[in-house]
Image (cartoon, rainbow, N blue to C red):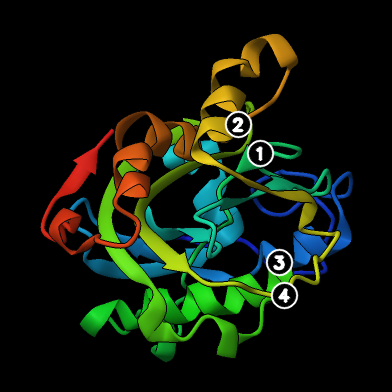
Amino acid sequence: MMVEDNNNNSSNNNAGASGLDLSKYDDEQVRLMGEMCIVIDRDDNAIDAASKKTCHLMTNIDQGLLHRAFSVFLFNSKNELLLQQRASEKITFPDHYTNTCCSHPLATALELEEAGQLGVRRAAQRKLEHELGIKPEQVPLDCFKYLTRIHYLAPSDGTWGEHEIDYILFVKADVDLDVNPNEVKSVKYVSMDEMKQIVDTAEQTGTKLTPWFRLIGDNFLYKWWAQIDNLDALEDHQTIHRM
């Protein structure tokens, strides 16, 4: 599968070959749209690379374009989950609450490495520092617990969306935060009961939740959370859950 990528990288805010005008978006977020994601098939085999912009346009998603992603759930020593609210500057799902960190491994040698999910783990470590200021030494690669993968599609608006196979990573660590305001609007630690209340009252309180966070919450989160210190039996590395 060959992906035509008309993104001339980062700083070009003008309408590109796709006719999309990026000038209304935040400059740094537009720059990040030039990062190269890993294009995959339905079985999570890497088959190509395309820009983040290309991967998140609904015109391409509607044609089946699929990329690799990860979702990190970080818990402190009190078993509280760190949530973030995505910054208003984000192009997809701005101001939505979500799990600790959600992003993409890049099409680089280090983040393409599949043995032991090393590429995904490196990407998770990189983005935890980029978004939340968490230093790599506080979240070593081997402290990430890889649980399973989900495959989902979710529009953000008429232009942008997500179509990913998402690696679910749990990590338990007490960390220091230095939040990047261009990525994250707010953060909070929540207990399981507080998390359930946020979800149950989201509609009446106007709290926006990302679609992948809702899917993981509805199908997996609480049973994993309840076994946070004994997750080995819950790992499922073979299945890609089609949501």
Q: Quadrant of residue 39?
A: bottom left
- In this picture, is 146 found above or below 162? below
Pointer 4: residues within 10 angstroms few (<14), some, or many (20+)? few
Look at 52% across and 36% down and name the residue there: 58
Question: For the view shown, which residue lies furthest in the top direction?
Answer: 204
| Quarter the N terminus occupies | bottom left
| Left or right position of 123 against 17 | left
Precedes in sequence: disc 3 or disc 4: 3
| Left or right position of 212 against 31 | left
The amino acid on which the numbered mark 4 sits, given as a three-letter code, is: Asp
Between the C-alphas of marks 4 and 1, the distance is 20 Å
| CB under 8 Å between discs 1 and 3 | no
Between the C-alphas of marks 3 and 4, the distance is 12 Å
Mark 3, residue position:
131
Give the secondary structure at mark 3: helix
Which of the two marks, 3 or 4, is nearer to us in this view? 4
Precedes in sequence: disc 2 or disc 3: 3
Q: 67 or 183, which is in the foreground? A: 183
Mark 4, residue position:
176
Question: For the view shown, which residue lies furthest in the front direction?
Answer: 78
The amino acid on which the numbered mark 1 sits, given as a three-letter code, is: Tyr
Precedes in sequence: disc 2 or disc 1: 1
| Left or right position of 195 against 207 | left
For the question of whether residue 62 can be seen, the reply is: no
**Residue 194, percent from left and from top:** 59, 32
